[in-house]
Amino acid sequence: MAPKWRELADKLAERIKRGEYAPGQQLPHIRDLVEAGEGSKSTVHAAYKALEAEGLVTSSRGHGTVVRQQAPLKRLGIARYDKAKWRDGDEVAFIADRVASGRAYKRGEQTQNVSRVSATPLVAAAHGLSTGAVVYARARVVREGDQPTHTLTSYYRPEHVEGTRIVDPTPGPAGRGGGFRVLYDAGYEIDHMREELFARIASPEEATVLQLSPGEWVVELHRTTYTADDTVVEFAVGIHAASRFAWAYDFKVPDSAREATQ
């Protein structure tokens, strides 16, 4: 049999999913559930901590335990990088996600901090550099209103971006069309990219920045962006609050056997 706290957590989770507890609504105080016979104080506390770890509620001093907004942002796959969005328009990737999700956005919801740093082994390997080589790091925190959704840090070789808007520390996207448009104007048109995803528990620092509860999960994204001749022009690391995104990928199914005979 499942522990008592697990049974209570599952019961409350089901009520949340059915809409009996709406987003923004406070769950009953622990003492109220204890008095209602749902278990001891430690049982109810453990159930609430489980709901918090699963991304269904948030808990804070003075506000109690509150149901989270459960409609995640749609994080587009291939479509968010459509050249028509950033080359011919002004729809950078995070804005493309908001548009696809039917959500409002403000350009100022993306902060920015640019600095010259020493390449870590991960960054150096992506760019084909020696560990410790100097690269530009463009770090952003993206918010939806007051709530952070993810961080993204892009790393560039200095010779690709020196003197461009990418290294301008002004908050927000790097001008019209964002960083990809800046690279395009500098003669580095992006052609293909590779994305790798890793799910893990957030570090204490990440939990603070993204306003996550202890034990919540994040999705770590590694994105390597290439020109047509396979020059790496950006390597990015994103940390996404797992419960705030739904990842969507649409693509044509390959048939390598047929292609080999053509």
Image (cartoon, grey):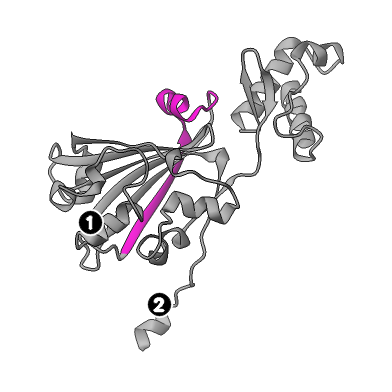
Q: Which residue shows up at 27% across the image and 37% down it?
A: 169
Give the left or right position of residue 11, taking residue 124 as reference.
right
Question: At label 2, which amino acid type do we have?
Answer: Ser
Any part of residue 171 in sight: yes
Q: Is residue 101 magenta?
A: no
In the rendering, at what x and y percent does residue 26 appear? 73, 23
Q: Which residue shows up at 40% across the image and 24% down it?
A: 205
Question: At label 1, which amino acid type do we have?
Answer: Val
Q: Is residue 202 magenta?
A: yes
Give the left or right position of residue 50, taking residue 233 as reference.
right
Residue 13, compared with residue 80, is above or below; it is above
Q: Which residue is mark 1?
A: 232
In the rendering, at what x and y percent does residue 25 appear? 74, 28
Mark 1 touches mark 2? (CB < 8 Å): no
Q: Nearer the viewer, mark 1 or mark 2?
A: 1
Quadrant housing residue 50? top right
Q: Which residues are magenta?
A: 192-214
Q: Which residue is mark 2?
A: 256
Q: Which residue shows up at 78% across the image and 10% down it?
A: 31
Total labels drawn: 2
Give the left or right position of residue 248, taking residue 78 as reference.
right
Quadrant for the C terminus, please.
bottom left
Q: Which residue shows up at 75% across the image and 23% down it?
A: 27
In the rendering, at what x and y percent does residue 8 appear? 77, 25
In the rendering, at what x and y percent does residue 159 appear? 12, 51
Any part of residue 247 in sight: no
